Image: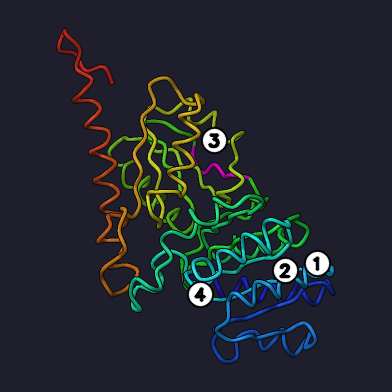
Amino acid sequence: MRKRGLQTVTDLARQFEDVVYIGSDVGQGTMDDFREACPDRFFVEGISEQYVIGMAAGLAMNGFIPYVNTIATFLTRRCYEQIAVDMCMNNHPVRLYANGGGTVYAPLGPTHMAVDDIALMRALPNMTVIAPCDADEMERAIRASHDWKGPIYFRVARGGDAIVSKPEHDFAIGRALVFAEPEDLLLITTGVTLQVALGVAERLADLAIGVGIVHVPTIKPLDRDTLVPRLREARFVMTLEEHSTIGGLGSAIAALMAAGERHPRGVLRQLGIPDTFPDRFGRQENQFEYFGLDLDSVIRSALGFLKLDVAESVNGSGKKTR
């Protein structure tokens, strides 16, 4: 995903003279194609994220569209004030291309795991937050970003993830995508957790349990027009994200339901990372298992969710009122 997205930025730079690349703490050779094609619009500024954001905002003030590329935790936590004041307060069209969203950098420990980035970026006025599910969707999202007014945060997963998006789902910023209509359970996902949700739906279909799936690549602005009708239909709603359960997709859906837009009997369960710093090193797959985000764990959570409501819905006659 990361490589495809950066290749698409290079394609945009060849097409549009206002596209600029700014790298910070990136590997040697990153974006060589861009540097060769557009040397006067290629910058690598080293480990100086606060400065890079100010530089990008200044370029945006002068008619450029900068794509800033570095590690997600450094891009969000280290220069939050500059993003808020220099970028968002002035609504400048800077694109933050954040490597390693979620637990991608688990081998490097908690300092490098961006499990709060969506919450941080959602809180900023004017900021758009996008988390594609695979490389194909990332390419579509980057191409759609050129003409978008205002700043964008791209949450970038690792490379090599399976392609699960569909060409007929032509990407539009701010639009959610319905992969299956809600039946017994509605799963709402963002980023790479769509891949898990599709596996859950396939496995539960064998148990005659119908699973609806809505993929939300744009967490902000939230697509109320797509989500609200599905939330009205679904009694069991589960959000799934590689992010803290505080401030991410689940919080956005909970707020939408609490605003009176939900089905009167609808219940919500959020699956994600609890209110803690990840305390284990290892691979991304290890983190998914540890936090209950892998396929088997989500299936157990879904079955427990459905069973719990049935058990608690026994009326006075002893009949189950699911």
Position of 69 relative to 244 (above/below): below
Q: Magenta: predominant secondary structure element?
A: strand
Judging from the image, what secondary structure is the residue with disc 3 in? helix
Write down the residue under mark 2: 57
Amino acid, disc 2 = Ala
| Residue shown at the point (68%, 64%) measured from the top left | 86
Write down the residue under mark 1: 61
| Dot in front, 1 or 4 | 1
Amino acid, disc 4 = Ile
Q: Is 62 situated left or right of 224 in this image?
A: right
x then y, percent, for residue 98: 55, 69
Q: Is 238 situated left or right of 55 in this image?
A: left
x then y, percent, for residue 104: 41, 70
Amino acid, disc 1 = Met
Check if mark 1's residue and mark 4's residue have beta carbons within 8 Å. Answer: no
Write down the residue under mark 3: 227
Q: Which mark is residue 71?
A: 4
Looking at the rendering, the stretch of residues picked out in magenta corresponds to 175-180
| Residue shown at the point (77%, 68%) measured from the top left | 60
| Quarter of the image where the C terminus is located | top left
